[in-house]
Amino acid sequence: MTARALDSPARESLPVGKIHSPRGTPRLSKRSRWRAASLILVHVLVLVHLAHWRVRGSTLTPVEPSESMQTFELGYVNAGFIMFAVATLATLIVGRFFCGWACHVVAYQDASAWLLGRVGIRPRPIRSRLLIWVPLAAALYMFLWPTIARWLEGVRFAGFTAHFRTDEFWASFPGPGIAALTFVVDGFLIVYLLGAKGFCTYGCPYGAVFGFVDRSARARIRVTDACEGCGHCTATCTSNVLVHLEVARFGQVVDSGCMKCLDCIDVCPKDALYFGFGESRSSALSRAKVKGNVPARVYDFSFGEEVALALVFLGTLFAVRGLYDLVPFLLAIGLSVVSALAAVLGWRVVRRQRVMFQSRSLVEDGKRSALGWSALGLCVPWFLFVAHSSWVQVHATRGRWLLLDAKAQPEAERGPTLARSLAELDRAADLGLVDVADLEFQRGQILARQGDWDLARKRLQRALELDPKLALAAKELADLEPRRKEQLAMSEFRSATQARVAGQMQASEDHLLRALELFPLLTPANLDLSDLRMSKTPPDLAGARAALHAILEVDPLNAEAQRRLGLLEQRFGPEPGR
């Protein structure tokens, strides 16, 4: 394996208009129009689905592969899981047609490549040894980790249940602003930086699943003896597949990145390519290894740069994943990939005498161009933001882990851990650029347990302002006043006990009455009040019985109250009027 610099032309890239072929420049594919129509139809169906929900208030669960996470985590068999399963089975037969003809992110990437092409920009694909594993890691996280986490926590899986209708169609999706940013980053920006289908190559977890299954697909793009090796197929391919080399070596396209757009078939001047069934890829690869004709792949980064890419990717992913309850997983992946590339590119701009990127000069003879300075000008604030976000996430993560630890401790021992948790969460909130509903809820939760009722109420109300659908915050706020009264009642009860030990009987009774006024369900207070009234001279028999009956009104089977009433009846006779 060798490495090539970003400032060198791609040796495995054949851009349209640069083919050295006796047949000239490739013609435009007519199939691309049909594919564009298919992708537009997908968006029309999404809008119809959304309109149905807005009109009826309830609709079919989103037909989106990400909904499969609910199936693996909660056991909800929904429309998204069914669609993903059907698409995967179809891929096993005919290959990655779904990606090329029905994926909305592919539509945005193709639109971006077309727009860039209109202004003369044709980004070459960037090749990395380590970032190529990101989609697989993301797929394992989304579809396997929920099961592993449930097993580690000792939670028993309740089984699968049908979940095909929803009243909250948009509940699992980000707001319009973040959705638009996701499409811009994953669908447009990555294309310019990493080449056509850049997000499919370096970010898409669903593509990783389809690509793996595609390896066993029987239907492939194949070649006849009419092929002249002109390269028009490769020049037209938007999936960065070296079609002319693959069909020459294997007699078929074996690259799992092939999304079956079929443009290569349409532009072949000899009609030598076709889509059909035949020998599997595994057999073809085995034959190729025997012949020893598989060349070394060329990469854009040295091994040191690859390590830097991986570290920056992981650091950025930690910093932005779920940041401020806004950044969803796929956007975080896209931002992290872009961040990793920007870090290496920025380092080159600072250190090297000559740097080219996507045919644009950033540094020439040690002098940075305006574009080079602009690139550095964008990198500096971005990485300052990432560093700041990482610090926010560190404190927030520590606080949440400490809160979980506190919940696992006996109630009498939770105080110090809750205090440390609150301190970390407060730091995260103070450092943060915006208020976060989940953070405000957790802070309010701790403050309530510490008895700071006014500030707890303020935090919980703020959490509901930020997210009115945060049910846990609403419940905590509703329980706040009863819990406040219960804790105040317990404080009065303890004061009553201290006064009684000190011989201050009237003060003890006053404390007990205030405790019961705050929290009438405090059974020990009623029992002590009954004893206190019986200790008077003469005994307050009616008052003692009233305290015991107050217990039985709430708990008719309370054995201690019944026993004491029985003793009073034996000693003083039946209670008048009962």
Image (spheres, rainbow, N blue to C red):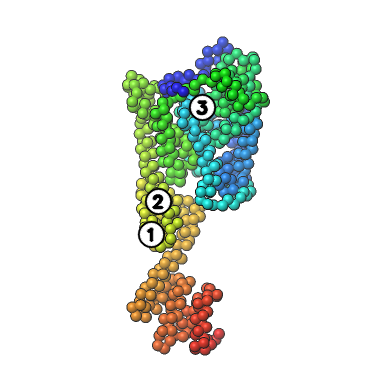
Q: Spatial distance from mark 2 to mark 1, Cα to Cα?
A: 14 Å
The residue indicated by pointer 2 is 399
In the orientation shown, which residue stands out farthest toward the top? 22
Q: Which mark is residue 196?
A: 3
Mark 1 neighbour class, 10 Å CA radius: few under 14, some 14 to 19, many 20 or more? some
Of the image marks 1 and 3, the number of the one nearer the N terminus: 3
The residue indicated by pointer 1 is 415
Mark 2 neighbour class, 10 Å CA radius: few under 14, some 14 to 19, many 20 or more? many
- Residue 160: x and y in percent read 62, 48
Q: Closer to us: mark 1 or mark 3?
A: 1
Q: Nearer the viewer, residue 369 or 138?
A: 138
**Which residue lies at the image location 60% right of the left edge and 39% below the top edge?**
84
- Residue 284: x and y in percent read 61, 23
User: Is residue 176 something one can see in this rendering?
Assistant: no
Which amino acid lies under the numbered mark 2 shown in the image of this protein?
A: Gly
**Which residue lies at the image location 50% right of the left edge and 78% below the top edge?**
561
Q: Secondary structure at mark 1?
A: helix
